Image: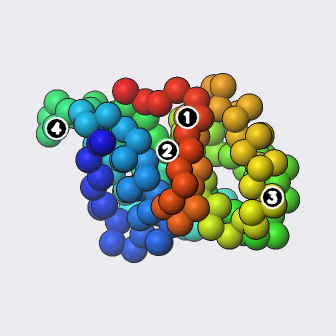
Amino acid sequence: MGKAVNENGDASRSERESLAVVAALMPARLTVVLRPPSGGRGAGGGSTSDLVVYQGEGENRIQVATIDVYTPESSTDPKQIGKMVERKLGSQASGMCVDFVKVPAPKRGRVKDRLEEIAENAYIVVHVNGQDAEAYGNRPG
């Protein structure tokens, strides 16, 4: 289990839970940091990932991966969730953590199938309120 560090005092519950989930999936030598947002929230807002995965400490710290947190709304179409994940992977992160807390259970299977396909080129973690975590793709480190 990796180490979790929250540097974002304004983090949402989903971001904090995603930090814990991702850190729990990492090897012990890695540290996952939840950093403050750059830019605003929402569509077109931030331009950096929420989570950064590091190996080492202090001056010897090396960035291993960037992971963005995404919490789709209940009304978001499963295809749109996949497209948003692809867009974020193409512009601001090497991995994604998707919190299904607002996604109705019947939609989750279709979304997971799409995310597994996308994960051929990325690391994707899904969970519901910090529980039932699943990971697809190659884990950093």
For the C terminus, the image quarter is: top left
Disc nearest the viewer among 1 and 4:
1
Disc nearest the viewer among 1 and 2:
1
Q: CA distance from mark 3 to mark 1?
A: 21 Å
Q: CA distance from mark 1 to mark 2?
A: 8 Å
Q: Which mark is residue 123?
A: 1
- Please report whichever mark, 1 or 2, sits nearer to the chain's N-terminal start: 2
Percent from the top left, x then y, of residue 108? Answer: 75, 55
Please name the residue shown 51% across and 59% down the image: 131
Please name the residue shown 53% across and 66% down the image: 129
- Left or right: 111 as drawn, with respect to 3: right
Q: Secondary structure at mark 2?
A: strand
Q: Residues within 10 Å of mark 3 (few under 14, many from 20)?
A: some
Q: How is the image coloured?
A: rainbow
Callout 1 touching callout 2 (CB < 8 Å): yes
Which residue is label 2 attached to? 67
Which residue is label 4 attached to? 57
Q: Secondary structure at mark 4?
A: loop
Callout 2 touching callout 4 (CB < 8 Å): no
Callout 3 touching callout 1 (CB < 8 Å): no
Q: CA distance from mark 2 to mark 4?
A: 19 Å
- Please report whichever mark, 1 or 4, sits nearer to the chain's N-terminal start: 4
Name the kind of residue labelled 4 in the image.
Glu
- Please report whichever mark, 3 or 4, sits nearer to the chain's N-terminal start: 4
Q: Which mark is residue 62?
A: none
Name the kind of residue labelled 1 in the image.
Tyr
Name the kind of residue labelled 3 in the image.
Lys
Relative height, residue 92 to residue 77 (above, below): above
Q: Secondary structure at mark 1?
A: strand
